Amino acid sequence: MAAEAILLSRSDFLLAFVCFVFCYYLCQIFRRSNVPVDWPVAGMLPGLLLRFRRIYEWGTCLLREVGCTFVFRGPWLLGMNYVVTCDPANLQHVFSAGFSNYPKGEEFSEIFDVLGDGIFNSDGESWKKQRMRAHGLISSRSFRSFVAGSSRRKVEQGLIPLLDGIARQGTVVDLQDVFLRLTFDSTCHLVFGVDPCCLSIEFPTIPFARAMDDAMGALFLRHIVPPALWKLMKWLGIGEEKKLATAWKEMDRFIAERIAEKKKQRSLGKNHIREGEGKLDLLSSYIDDHDDEEQHTSQQESSKFDKLLRDTTMNLMLAGRDTTGAGLTWFFWLLCNNPTVEFRILEELKKAAPLRNERSSSDDLVVFDAEELSKLVYLHAALCESLRLFPPVPFEHKAALQHEVLPSGHGVGPGTKILIPLHAMARMEGIWGEDCLEFKPERWISEKGRMRHEPSYKFLSFNSGPRTCLGKEVAFTQMKTVVAAMVYNFQVEVLQGHVVEPKLSIILHMKNGLRVRIKRRTHEGVV
């Protein structure tokens, strides 16, 4: 009897679930709306989960339908209520005018716990102190010179020879993998002062990079499921949370080794950075600043400083490796599908090439320097347009401290979470015009041929307000160096039939990579 009762209860549950799904689809068919049904108890979560695999497309359609701001209601008592908005007036208020009322919040820190107490997670005085220190280092003329020189060398000695070899062999390559290896090496050099040389024809395995990818996927899922569920999975050590725990250990191991090596170098009075660059990697700068401030520290203070170094470098690695790599990948996919834009960039590069005075290491493979790149308006506009359509960080996350009414008329209370979908924002006709879906660099260029300014609360790829990205110029320098050298020297063709779609992650990578063929470009005529 007990067994029959169990079977009956299971059958009842299955029947109830099937009826629920059937009723849901009937509601959607008759309503013909992208707005999910707000069910008793369950809220809108069932609709979100059913659309999970196409969340970027659905989010865009939803915000077009409701007018840039939508209130998502999650299950009762599970803390999943959000105000989802890409209204520029709301964003100007949240990121600038009302900045003090919209910190990242405790839930943000919980979701992104792997980043520790670094600048991305911190608020208040801790954030101000970290930002002030980072700004002083990154904005210095010496560090910018270091970035320009390091970027040029990596492209000249690493990327160009690799692509030349691939072009000669005629093999297919995953360009996303190439870019992530390039940015991993470059970021390691800027942050730790060492180049792990992952950008090589052998394509060696990178445990840290794989761990970071696993971590980003798990963090994305934390935005979708109820907090109680992912916390339970974390406690049990299952699913994506198990992957995150393993990835966390690997990332900590890698960073701890780099910090230990750097401290050993400093204690021996040695510095392995190239001659003429000085102690310009960020880890050396942080250690030197600390040594100048604290001549004698206790074991407890030393451990606290080690955690600060770990959290800081972890944040810097995420900012440098993933975002720039993703930005480059989407840019070349757009370029392959828009030959007119490629032609205009190439023409601009050809005009700059005679001014080089043969500064590259090869007569026929050209690498441009920072001064030349700074004058290329169309290239800069094309990069901005690519970052608009495919922002490397597809959404931002805030939380309200006190009750307020947003400019759109939507009210928020203490603890209300605000989600800003940058990917959807680029596809709003009311914000970017009827041609918002087009890859159109010209929208960034004025009638006088100069860059047209777009407010940061409209173009949020580098954040906005007091939290505007400190590495913006670093990112542009790296991307321009790569794009100019590749477009001038090579033709990139996406493999026919290759499916391109975004990966479900907090970084907008391509799910299937970007498989391409590389060919050497000739300049006897216009290509």
Image (cartoon, helix red, strand yellow):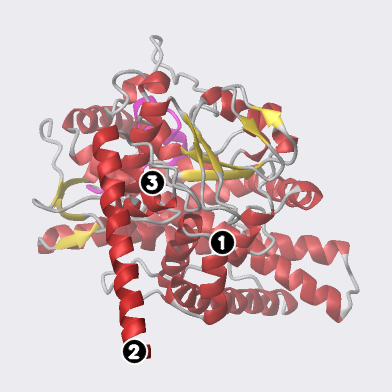
Name the disc covering residue 94, or none. none
**Eye-nearest disc, 1 or 2:** 2
Front one among 375 and 130: 130
User: Position of 67 compared to 442: left or right?
Assistant: right
Question: What span is colored magenta in the figure?
Answer: 364-379
Q: CA distance from mark 1 to mark 3?
A: 30 Å
Taking depth in this image into account, of 315 and 68 the one nearest to the observer is 68
Tag count: 3
What residue lies at 41% left-to-right and 56% top-to-bottom?
505
What secondary structure is found at the residue carrying circle 1?
helix
Query: In the displayed structure, would residue 346 be above or below residue 56?
Result: above
The answer to whether residue 412 is seen in the rendering is yes
Instruction: Please identify the quarter of the rendering in which residue 2 is found.
Output: bottom left
The label nearer to you, 1 versus 3, is: 1
Q: Is residue 393 above or below residue 279?
A: above
Q: Which residue is mark 1?
A: 227
| Residue beneath disc 2 | 3
Estimate the spatial distance between the alpha carbons at disc 2 and disc 3, rounded to whole Å: 57 Å
Whether residue 527 sits left or right of residue 23 in the image: it is left
Percent of width and height locating residue 397 = 57, 45
Q: Tell which circle, 2 or 3, labels the residue nearer the N-terminal end.
A: 2
Instruction: Assign a secondary structure to mark 3.
Output: helix
Q: Position of residue 381 (x, y in %)?
A: 38, 28
Label 2: state its secondary structure: helix
Q: Give the numbered dot on residue 327.
A: 3
| Quarter containing the C terminus | top left
What amino acid type should be assigned to the residue bearing mark 2? Ala
At horizontal 18% and vertical 37% (from top left) the residue drawn is 337
Residue 152 point in image, percent of width and height = 42, 50
